[in-house]
Each structure stands twice: as structure tokens, then as C-alpha cells.
Amino acid sequence: MAKAGQFFSSGHTNNWAVLVCTSRFWFNYRHVANTLSVYRSVKRLGIPDSHIVLMLADDMACNHRNPKPATVFSHKNMELNVYGDDVEVDYRGYEVTVENFLRVLTGRLPPSTPRSKRLLSDDRSNILIYLTGHGGNGFLKFQDSEEISNVELADAFEQMWTKRRYNELLFIIDTCQGASMYERFYSPNIMALASSQVGEDSLSHQPDLAIGVHLMDRYTFYLLEFLEDIHPSSTTNMKDLFKVCPKSQCVSTPGHRTDLFLRDPGSVLITDFFGSVRKVEITTDTINLTAPMVHLEDTRPVRELRTEIQTYMDQLPVAEIIHQKPKQKDWHPPDGFILGLWTLILLVFFKTYGIKHLKHIF
Amino acid sequence: MGLLSDPNRRRALTNLLTRLNAPICVVCYLAGVMWFMGLAFEPFTLRTYMSENAMGSTMVEEHFPAGERALATGREFAAHKKKVGGMPVNWLVKTMESRGLEVFTQSFTRKLPFPDENKERYLVRGTNVYGILRAPRASRTEALVLTAPCSQGNANNQAVGLLLGLAQYFRSQVYWAKDIIFLVNEHDLIGMQAWLEGYHHTNTTGGDWSPLHGRGGSIQASLSLELSSDVITSLDLVLEGLNGQLPNLDLANLFHAFCQKIGVLCTIQGKLQRNDWESTSGYSHSAQTMMLMVLKQASGRPWGDHGLFLRYHIEAATIRGINSFRQYKTDTTTIGRLLEGMYRKLNNLLERLHQSYFFYLMPSLTRFVSIGYYMPAFGLLAVILLLRVSFHLSDRRGLGVGLTRYPGVLSILTPVVISHMTGVALYCLPVMSQEMAVQHFPVSETEAVVLTAIAIYTAGLALPHNTHRYTLPLVLKLVALLYLAVLLGCTALINFSLGFILALSLVPIAAFITPHTHKPLSAAIMVLLSPGCTLLYCVLIFQELQETPVSLQDGWMLFLSVISQGILDHSLYGSLVYPLLALLIYPCWLLLWNILFWK
């Protein structure tokens, strides 16, 4: 009985995503491709369109300069079309402004705004916010005409917190000097990731010579590759997300911020933010609900690690629903192998020269 | 206390300026000339770079395949041209329609003020043919233009062939966001002027043309193609347009970027780039290239069919294929690919080219000096005039002798008016009186016009000088100096090269002419540095720089043709060099001549 109460008092109950691309013009194709790749992953992992607010500042698929109309590719040689058949853009073109973005976050929209354009989150929602575009130290440029500063963003998140509009928030930004955007956050339960540190530029990944533009930014490209491996029942946690796109691949140094987050990032699953998984425990015992349920106090202990007591069931076999191209991963020798190799070398050394040399080591 | 607010120091400063005026003027002049020559020195120049974000770093792969077919089309065009004896309008219309363009024609007539050597008749009649490739998905708001001239004889057949080949290739692509207009114009600049005027609904030069039935939106950029051989060794870029206007530097950067990518040899002013800027020959090579650009810009004529686009704020350049004696030849397919790449990049533009410089000089294709760097050269020359004004105002000994009462404005007016009337005569009479001249003298109309002009010019030297009893040479000199300063300043703003060259010759005589200098010597120097003789020197230097030096005899003939070309340019296209020289510079020089012969 108490266990049932505890079951309903943990964590979040619904997922939302706010995905924003802030730049327009044909040569900023890659920002739209970035946002659409995250949209694609998020939808694939279960968040429905009604819970996604997608803001694209320009229409690349139907741009007159697109040699492959109605497509937006993220991989060159047209391997992956992230536009697909069922994209639902909520804010398009000139509607993507700083004002509209902040209104969506804080919920201060005029009554005539349709539901698809609202972020109807509550205090049990986990929200994923993804921003991409051109940015600088402390600001993000919207549409070549205005900017949002990191202070404004932090204040918007504080408003969300006081209005209890989120349970936990994951903020990802892929712009130049992106880490400056999360420096000013001060509301609890926010985890932030950025593609580059202050003073560094985020670089684009690869141009496609048929289309003539850069298709993706590096950070989001590797993020997409990472997310393609995630399925609704995977248990990958945030610590793996922090490792996405190291400096060798990204040239810039991605950063993250977890000090405002109450749970240990190692216990936060990727699907807590990117997917919409329901916690289901199948049981064949009957539970006798004679007494009313005791609702556990909703204390939010500071710095106490919350461990999950339920596990996730593998609802459907993955290979049947997700048809993925077999990926060629870079093969690294396992860590243990290298350790074993060194041990072998040391043993051979000592065998040859005798044990008396050991004392020179220890 | 401050330098200018302390009366003692100010007096000391003015004394210094007055005592050392002549040496300071000489130093300024030499400094101006040195600064100008130093512009070609490579460490003082900047490397060119692409400024427009939309035409950014990523390149596309060009796929144009049909160079040979383009050459075959060119040969067909040549055959039809010879058969018709002019522009094969019907064949062109049929060919463009078969390639899927919307074809329109425009007929025009132009009455020349006098028959020049090329046309040999008063009335020029022609037809322009153009086809519009509509952008598959875009609205018809913007356009790009590709033109090739229909020249006489065997020139530019390959250009028209390549234009038609590109039209066919472009038609099958879906990524055009702007309409592309393929224009074949007759009679070079006259046809181009008629087409542009018809397109923009203006009629500034008094031609007669039929209105255009098809339009494509506002033109963002244009390229003019001149190709007269099947294979080429290099591509030459021509930038100078009407009245010395230049297209945005980004167009030159785009051309150079593609030449490097495709591997075609590119030149500007017909000169290849050299890498050895430290050596004297390397420096003189850059200086020659820059001088050629300066002379071409100063002449104010459009040096390619693109030159007339610039006044409508359309960035345009001419690409000329040159076939010289090099080993490595480039075929038509490669040129087609280069043009395809350039047009794809221009297709990405969202607004007119405006990020890069509009005023620049290029010592080579990859180096440029912007207006901020070259204008001080002119400034140093102009400051000499102001120094002389201050000198004459403070030093009353030379010209201010006999100042009994303040002379009225009216007394200045006489020499000024007489000089300007002579200028007006120089401007109007040659063209107006050509029939009378032809009746009385055994010359052709062109020669009549030019010789009348020279006659009036020389006659101005013999103007009466003693009509100014009540005025002073000081006042006239001040007026002349200020007038020249304003004139040269305004000219340099619009056309730096013209202003600089005129300043080089006029500023010394304006600065140092007084009634008291040695008359025969000063008169000789004045005539030698007069605008007419400056023009003659420029013609000779231009021929020298183009590596075709001429003798004085041929130079004189060339000089006469330049004068007739200038008058013709002014009436046909609105070039401002001839009216500037006749109506403003020449009267100013006459004022100085007046001062010299003061009694």
C-alpha cells in the first residue's frame, strides 16, 4: 500500500519538448536540420506532437533554392531525411520571436492561442528545451533582428518554476559560445548542456555538394547519432549524454551544468526527457485497496539522491519497430584489453629479468 | 595655451605657413604622388575576401556537360548571322523557344549626333532578343542576367553558343530562386542601353525603342560574356563601367573564387598576377595594372557591355575569354561550369550585393585598395590649393598691390562669364556646326566635329584679357583656386581616377601662376598641362601600358578618335567626362590663363 503511494509520488508524469530554430536564410540550413533531427528523435521515443512545440524560423524544405524540394537532410549523400511526412511546425517563419518564445515558456499567451502553440505543462512535466542558431557571449540571435540574453532566459525559467510549470528541465543549446547561455540559471531542477564554451565557436559538420550548404552542426550531428541508439526502454543515463561529441570530434568543448539539478545525473535516464515513457509495472497479484492511499509528503530534499525503485519493462522488441541502417561504429579495443596487455608486458618483463626488479617499482 | 586659440602661436603658425608655403606645397604634391604610387606596393594592399554571407564558403559541384554542343550552336549562329547580314532574329527566337524560355524581342533605333568611324551612318537600327527562364517555384520578383553581344564578323559566336547551351542546362534545374534572363544584344552598347532603358521604363538619352513585353523582376546581378574562340587560355575580368563606376567587389571575389576552384587562369586588365612583389619588376607590374585601371576608370566609358548596368545599381561585370600562346587550354565545358557555379552562388543572394566595397582600385586580381586608402592621395593634392588660398589671403604683397577699394562682385563676373561661354561653345558648337564645316572643308563629319572642338579650344587661348579694369588679380586667383578645389573635389568623389589625373596636371599651374611669372615659360607650361594635353598624355601612356606603344603620329590619330568617342559617349549613354571637361574644367583653366596674362 505504501509502495503504491510511493509509486505515484515519484518523478514526472508527462513529457514536453520545446524545440527552437532561431535563424532564417538558406545558408542557415543546418540550424533547421539540427532542430528537425532532435524533433525526429523525440517523436520516435514517444512524445506526441501535441506535447511538442516546434519553432522553425524558416522553411528550408520548400525554399526555392532547395534542389531536393520537400526534404531536409542531415547526412550528406541524402542518407537521412529529417523532414519526413508528418512534421508539425507550431511556430513558423516570422512567428519565431523572442517574445513568442518567452510567452510559450511562461504560459502568458493570449486566450485565442490554439492548444498546439501552448506549452501546457504542469508541475509533473519534464521539459526538454533545445535551442540552435547563431549566438554569442550571453545572447542568442533570433531571425537576424533581435536577441535573447541569458538573463532573460534565466528569469523565464524562474517564472516557470514559481508557476510550477515544470518538474525537471533539460536545456540543450547548440550555438557558438553556448555555455554562456546557461551561466545565469538559478532555478532548481535544471540541467543544461551546450555545444561550446565561452570564446569558442561551434562548428558545422559537413557540406553536401549537391545541395550546396552545410547540413548539420557537429554537436547535434553526434547527438543525433547518440539518440539513434536510444529506444524507449533503454537505460542510458545522462552521464553518457555528457560524453557526446568530445573535443576530438567537435573541435569545441561541450559543456554541461548540473549543480541546480537535484537528482544524480547518473540516475537520470535519457528517456526521462527525450521520450515519453510510462512507468508500468505488470503484476499478477491483486492489491487490496481497502484503506485510502497515503500520499507521501512532497518534500524535495536537497542533495538527497533519489533512487528509482521501479524498473522499465521492455514493452516491444526494438528490432521490429525501428528499422535502422546498420551502423559502422568506430571500433575501439575494450579498456580491459589494454589493461591486460600492460599486465602481460609487465609479467614477461619480470619473468625475464627476475623478481628482484620488482622492488624498483614498488 | 592651445595651438590655435593662443593669438601668439596662431600668428606664428600663419607666419610659418606664409613663409614656407611654396616648399610645403611642393612637399604635399610629391607626397600625394608617392602615396598614389605606393598603393600598388603589395604590403599596403589588402587581400580580397568574400564579404557576403549568402555567397558563403560552401561550394556546389558543377555539372554542366554540354560544351561541344554549345560550340555547335555557336557555329550555327555564325552561319545564320552571315546569311541575314546582321542579327538572326528568327533563328534566335526559335532556338530560345525550343530551349523552354519565354522569348521576346525589342527593336530600337538611335540617331547618332554624328556618324562615328564604326557605324559610318547617322541612324543605327537593331533588335535585341532575350529569353526569360522563369524560376520553377519562386515568384517573379528578382532576376539575374546573362548577356552575349551579337557582334559583326566572326566575333563572339562562341559566346552566344555558350549562352544558349547554358540556357538549356539551366532550364532543367529546379533550384533557381530568381528568373534568369538570357540577352543577345545588337550593336553592343547601343542595344544594351535601349534594353536597359526599356526594362526600367526610363528614357534618359533620347533613344527610340519598342517597349519590352516580358520582364523578370528587379535585376540583382548580371554577367556579360565575350568569347571568340573554341578554346581559351585565360579569362579576363572587366569591371570599369560608365563614368568610372565599379561593381561591388564581391563580384570580382566570386569570379576569382571560382577561377581558383575550377583551375582556370584569370587576369584583370589582361595582366597575370605575379608573386614577387619585392622585386622592382613585380612592383612595376602591379603599378602598371593599377594605372591601367585608373586610366580606364578616368575615361568614363563603359569598357564592356556590363558598364551600363551599373547606373541602375545592378552589379555587373564582363568576362572575356582570351586565347593566347599558352600551353594549357581550357575548353568550353569548363567555362560553362564556371558560369554555372557563379550563377548558383548568385542565386543564393537574398539582397543586392552591398557588403563589400564599391570604390576600390585593384593592383591585381587578389589585392585591392579601398577608398579610405587611396583618397588621401587626392587629399594631399587638394590641400595645396587651400594652402595657396591661405597664402594669398595673408600675404598681400604679391597680388594685393593697389587695393584702394573693395572690388565688387560684378567685376569678377566678366572673366568668369567669358570663360564659361567659351566652355559652352566648346560643348555645343562642334556637334551643331558639323554640316557647315563639312560644306566648307574637305573632311568627314567625325573629323569636322573633332577639329572644331580643337579649334575652339585653341581659340580660347586668344581671348581678350583687358576687360577687367576694376578688379584685382588676387580676387580672380582666389576665385579660380576655390573653384578648382571644389570642382576637383566633387569629381574625385564620383570618379577618383578622373579627379586625381586632373589634379596632377592642374594643381601645379593653379598654385603657382601669377601675373608676375616669366610669361613665355609659364604660357608653355600652362599649355602643356592643359586638360587637352593631359588627355593626349593619357592616351600615349595607356597605349604604352597595354604593351602596344604608338608613335606620336598614331597617338595623335588615337587622340582625335578618343575625343570623338567622348562626345559620342556623352550623347549616347550620358557619360559625364566630356561635359565636365568642356563646361567646367576648361573654363577654370581659362581663368588661370587670364591671370597669367594680366596687364
Image (cartoon, grey):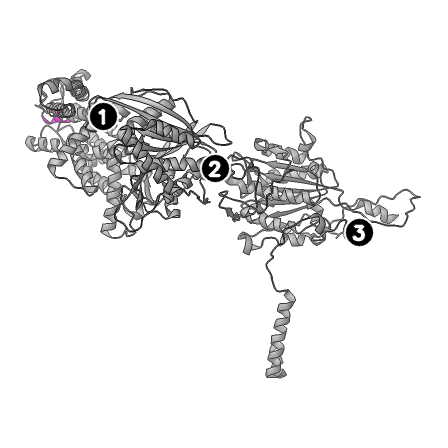
CA distance for labels 1 and 2? 43 Å
- The chain identifier of the residue carrying mark 2 reads B
Depicted B265 relative to depicted B318: above or below:
below
Q: Which residue is mark 2?
A: B173
Q: Whole-Å distance between the Cαs marked 1 and 3?
A: 93 Å
Residue B308 relative to residue B54: left or right: left
The reply to whether discs 1 and 3 touch (Cβ–Cβ < 8 Å) is no
Residue A128's x, y, as percent?
A: 67, 43
**Is disc 3 surrounded by few (<14), some (14 to 19) or many (20+) residues within 10 Å?**
few
- Quick one: quadrant of the C terminus of chain B? top left
Q: Is residue A350 above or below residue B2?
A: below
What kind of element bears circle 3?
loop
Queried whether the magenta region covers residue B596, the answer comes back as yes
Residue B18 visible? The answer is: yes
Residue in view at x 77 percent, y 53 percent: A307
Distance CA(mark 2)–CA(mark 3): 57 Å
Q: Report the front residue among A295 and A270.
A: A270
The answer to whether residue B485 is left or right of residue B596 is right
- The residue that disc 3 covers is A310
Most common SS among magenta residues: helix
Residue B234 colored magenta?
Answer: no
Amino acid residing under circle 3: Gln
Question: In the drawing, does residue B153 fall left or right of residue A198?
Answer: left
The numbered mark, 1 or 2, whose residue comes first in the sequence reads 2
For the N terminus of chain B, the image quarter is top left
Q: Please, which chain is the residue tagged with disc 3 on? A: A
Q: Are marks 1 and 2 on the same chain?
A: yes
Q: Contact, CB < 8 Å: mark 2 with mark 3? A: no
Identify the secondary structure beneath mark 2.
loop
The magenta stretch spans which residues? B591-599
**Residue with the mark numbered 1:** B568
Q: How far from the left and from the top, in percent, is residue A109? A: 67, 30
